[in-house]
Structures are given as C-alpha cells and as structure tokens.
Image (cartoon, rainbow, N blue to C red):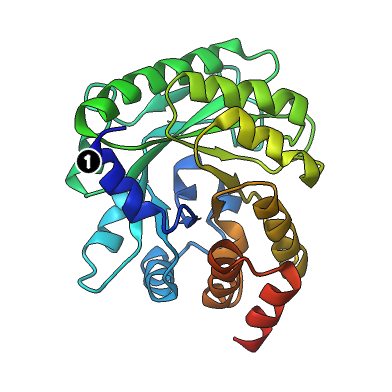
Amino acid sequence: MSVTSKVRMNRLFRDGKCLDVAIDHGIANEPDFLLGLENIAHVMQSLIAARPDAIQVNYGQADLLQQCPARKPALVMRTDVGNAYNASRHREMWAVLHNPDEPILAALQMDAAAVVVNLYLIPDEPGILRMCIENIGRLRQACERYAMPLMVEPLVMAPAGQGAAYGSLGDVEKMVPLVRLARELGADIIKADPTDNTDDFHRVVEAARCPTLVRGGGKGEIGAVLAKSAALMAQGASGMVYGRNVYQHENPSRVVKALMAIIHQGASGAQALDIYQQG
C-alpha cells in the first residue's frame, strides 16, 4: 500500500479500529431501507455530532458531510448500485458502478478516505458475480493509481424466497471462500457479515488478511447488538459498519458512544450497555 493510501487509512482507522456508520441505503431502491432516513440532512448532522470514525454514503448525499465546517468523521463512498435487495426477485440480477469510466472520480472530488463495492454470491445468478468481479477490477486499477483504499463487501445471499428479499447469510463455509476471493482481487478492507456462530468469525478475519469490519444488517435489540459486537471484536474484527442499528434507533448518539467504547476501549457488551443507558 502506498504512503498516500496509508494517509487515507489513518483517517479511517484509529489505532487500527473503526466504526463506520452506513447511511447509503437509498441506493437500494427499497422503501423499507429508508425508514429513519427520511430527513437525511438531520440524520447526517446527528451522526457528525455523535462522532463515529466514518460515515458511509453515496455521492448524491456526500455533500451533507463534507460541507460541514467542523471536525467530522471520514467519508466512505459507495461506488456501485444493484437490485439484489429488492423484495421480489428480478428476471435479471445486476450490479453496476455509478461511473464505470472514472469509478473513483466522485470519491476523489469529495475527499473520501475509502470507497466500497459489493461482491454478491447469489444462488443460480452467476451473472451478478461476474459483474461484481468486473466492478472490483475497474476500481482496483483506479484505486491503485490514485492511492484510494478499496473496501469490498462480500455477501453470501440466500436463495430466492428465503427470508426478506435476498437476505445475506452467515454460513462460514460459504463466506470464507468469498472473502478470500475479495482479498485475491485486491481488497484493502473487508466488510463482512457476522458468522452464524460468532466463534467462527476469526476464520473470516484470517481469510481476509486485511482489516475486517463487521456488517450490521437489520436492526436488533440494543443489548444483543452490543454483546455480539464485543464478541466479534474478540474474534479479531477491526470494527463495525452499522447502519439500521444506529440510524433507526431513537437515540443514535448513545448507540455510537457504546459501540465506540467496544471498538476503541475494549469494553464488554455489558459495559457498553451501561454506557448506552447512562447516555
């Protein structure tokens, strides 16, 4: 990794750890994902005040972060859009870059610390996997040229009809090869689902051989979320990328404070819950 890439990584990771709050859900074209994000300008201001390490957002909303004159979290910009999360299965599954010709130009213009892209593995849909690999190839070339860290999100998705939309799975036997593929393609950071058995997550970290962040998924009960987050950190995770577990909460700043204690101070789930309850 180049010196300038390390500069951006240092903006994203403090002591090798990171809490990235994702509010890029509007790209999914799925109404349920927008619950809690209706007033995204207000959400952004609340998150800036809560001070996670990073905020993950799409180009069209990145100005809400970068126009803020105060000290603010680093920007992680999503670079792709697809139809894998819609409630009904489509005849054609696809994932494309926002700008295939200059895939990280917007991230450079907005002074992002990293870019993120999906790597979907969907049963009986080899075409979307190929598209994702092509997307990563284009991004890797541009990221190398301009010293931009590349975060890859390898997702093992459920067969059609199982769970909400194409819900992702925590099957470690399927996750490890896909994470390894993401690393082989040049990922600098991995954003992965938690494994079904938390004690297996170290295998994902070992396959990644780079900073590995845990993807949050749907909103859960706060005590369980914090306990699981602490357990995943103990398995070697470098932090979290949580969205709905933060922005759909009645008090996002308290959730951020509790998660930051787990990630940066090594707090247990119970200690983090106390921090959350104390406000």
The C terminus lies in quadrant: bottom right
Type of amino acid under label 1:
Thr
Residue name at image x 54 percent, y 74 percent = 257
Asked whether residue 113 appears in the rendered view, the answer is no
For disc 1, the marked residue is: 4
Side of 12 where 247 appears, left or right:
right
Kindly identify the residue that appears in the image at 24 percent across and 74 percent down. 70
- x then y, percent, for residue 63: 25, 57
Q: Is residue 258 left or right of residue 201?
A: left
- Name the spot of residue 16 as percent of width and height, x first: 46, 52
**Is residue 213 or residue 21 the one in the foreground?**
213
One can see residue 50 in this view: yes
Q: Residue at x 41, y 54 (%)?
A: 13
Compared to residue 153, the image places residue 32 above or below, namely below
Position of 187 compared to 251: left or right? Answer: left
Closer to the camera in the image, 125 or 170: 170
Residue 243 sits in quarter: bottom right
